[in-house]
């Protein structure tokens, strides 16, 4: 590249690094990360992503609003994360810290290309966060995508805002309610008994209702949202277990709170986990806000 460029290349402007599936599976990712960390011009705040799509297809996507490439969601993922925090962005610094500390695994945002936008000039492609890839120091574990990855959002204090849709039964018909979840507070408590450790999860958050039909009470919303969030957390956890991945970094919670127990129980830097490792999920919804109106329908019959 140096031989073909007309100007001096300055790597300090680099904003993100995209790994192909072959690079992740061939265990080249660690060497690549090490190279960019050691190079004198690159910065630690480079965002890191992975994809199964052809690299050129992702890199050649232009911004939807026809702005500078530095305004794309890959270059500046914090912009869209304020409104929908499905997957937490990860930079090189966070990636290295996560790989060097228990559980020695990290979730890298998984990016794909969609063609679901229409413009005056025809269909337009856009990049889309569809899940995560799980990378360890020794291997690439695999991907957790789509609905199976939804639980990651609810086990992260950094979640600014997320959405969840629940089904309501009104007058023998099924209606759907979508709520925004905000001000998420996550606490995980390890319970050690001999050579066995369980984890109790405590979540607190606020909810804001979007549109709904029929009569509805705050208690109905609480029950439905609590059930849905719990199911999504367990689904994601079990998907991680299938690939021997500690997707919620439960091992780190034990390491931080009881390092002696962690040393006694750990194997290759993490705690052996099973479906029963999360023994309790306690969810408390601080506030159920109806938005601008009340819990009565905006338009009545």
Image (cartoon, rainbow, N blue to C red):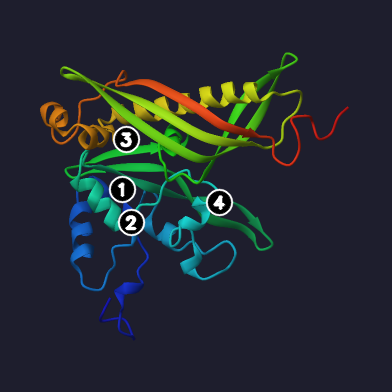
Dot 4 or dot 3: first in sequence order is 4
Q: Is residue 186 left or right of residue 290?
A: left
Q: Secondary structure at mark 1?
A: helix
The local crowd at label 2, few if under 14, some if 14 to 19, many if 20 or more residues have their Cα within 10 Å, is some
> What is the C-alpha distance between the residues marked 2 and 1?
18 Å
According to the image, label 1 marks what residue? 21
Residue at 20%, 44% in the rendered image: 101
Q: Which residue is mark 3?
A: 247
Q: Secondary structure at mark 2?
A: loop
Q: Percent position (x, y) of residue 34?
A: 18, 59
Quadrant (top left, top right, bottom left, bottom right) of the C terminus:
top right
**Residue 106 horizontal/vertical position (percent):** 28, 44
Q: Which mark is residue 195?
A: none
Dot in front, 2 or 1: 2
Asked whether residue 219 is in view, the answer is yes
- The circle on residue 91 is 2
**Mark 4, other Cα within 10 Å: few <14 / some 14–19 / many ≥20:** few
How far apart are the two marked residues, 1 and 3, measured between alpha carbons? Answer: 19 Å
The local secondary structure at tag 4 comes to strand
The residue singled out by tag 4 in the image is 115
Q: CA distance from mark 4 to mark 3?
A: 30 Å
User: Which callout, 2 or 1, points at the residue further toward the start of the chain?
Assistant: 1
Mark earlier in primary sequence (4, 1) = 1
User: Are dots 2 and 4 in contact, CB under 8 Å?
Assistant: no
Residue sitting at x 66%, y 28% = 176
Q: Quadrant of the N terminus?
A: bottom left
Q: Earlier in the sequence, mark 3 or mark 2?
A: 2
Q: Residue furthest top?
A: 172
How much space separates mark 4 and mark 1, taking CA atoms? 21 Å
For the point 60% across and 27% down, the residue is 166
């Amino acid at each position: 590249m140096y031989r073909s460029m007309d100007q001096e290349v300055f790597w300090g402007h680099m904003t993100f690094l995209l790994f192909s599936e072959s690079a992740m599976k061939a265990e080249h990712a660690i060497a690549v990360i090490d190279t960019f960390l050691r190079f004198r011009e690159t910065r630690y705040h480079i965002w890191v992503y992975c994809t199964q799509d052809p690299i050129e297809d992702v890199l050649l996507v232009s911004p939807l609003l026809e702005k500078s490439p530095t305004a794309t969601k890959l270059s500046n993922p914090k912009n869209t994360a304020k409104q929908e925090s499905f997957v937490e962005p990860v930079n090189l610094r966070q990636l290295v810290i996560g790989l060097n500390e228990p559980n020695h695994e990290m979730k890298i945002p998984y990016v794909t290309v969609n063609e679901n936008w229409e413009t005056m000039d025809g269909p337009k492609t856009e990049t889309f966060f569809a899940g995560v890839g799980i990378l360890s120091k020794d291997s690439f574990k695999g991907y957790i995508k789509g609905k199976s990855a939804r639980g990651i959002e609810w086990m992260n204090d950094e979640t600014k805002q997320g959405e969840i849709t629940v089904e309501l039964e009104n007058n023998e018909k099924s209606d759907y309610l979508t709520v925004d979840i905000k001000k998420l507070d996550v606490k995980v408590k390890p319970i050690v008994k001999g050579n066995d450790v369980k984890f109790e999860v405590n979540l607190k958050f606020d909810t804001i209702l979007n549109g709904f039909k029929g009569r509805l009470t705050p208690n109905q919303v609480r029950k439905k949202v609590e059930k849905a969030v719990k199911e999504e957390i367990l689904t994601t956890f079990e998907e991680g277990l299938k690939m021997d991945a500690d997707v919620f970094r439960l091992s780190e919670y034990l390491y931080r709170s009881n390092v002696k127990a962690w040393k006694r129980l750990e194997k290759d830097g993490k705690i052996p986990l099973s479906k029963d490792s999360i023994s309790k999920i306690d969810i408390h919804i601080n506030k159920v806000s109806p938005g601008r109106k009340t819990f009565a329908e905006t338009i009545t019959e």
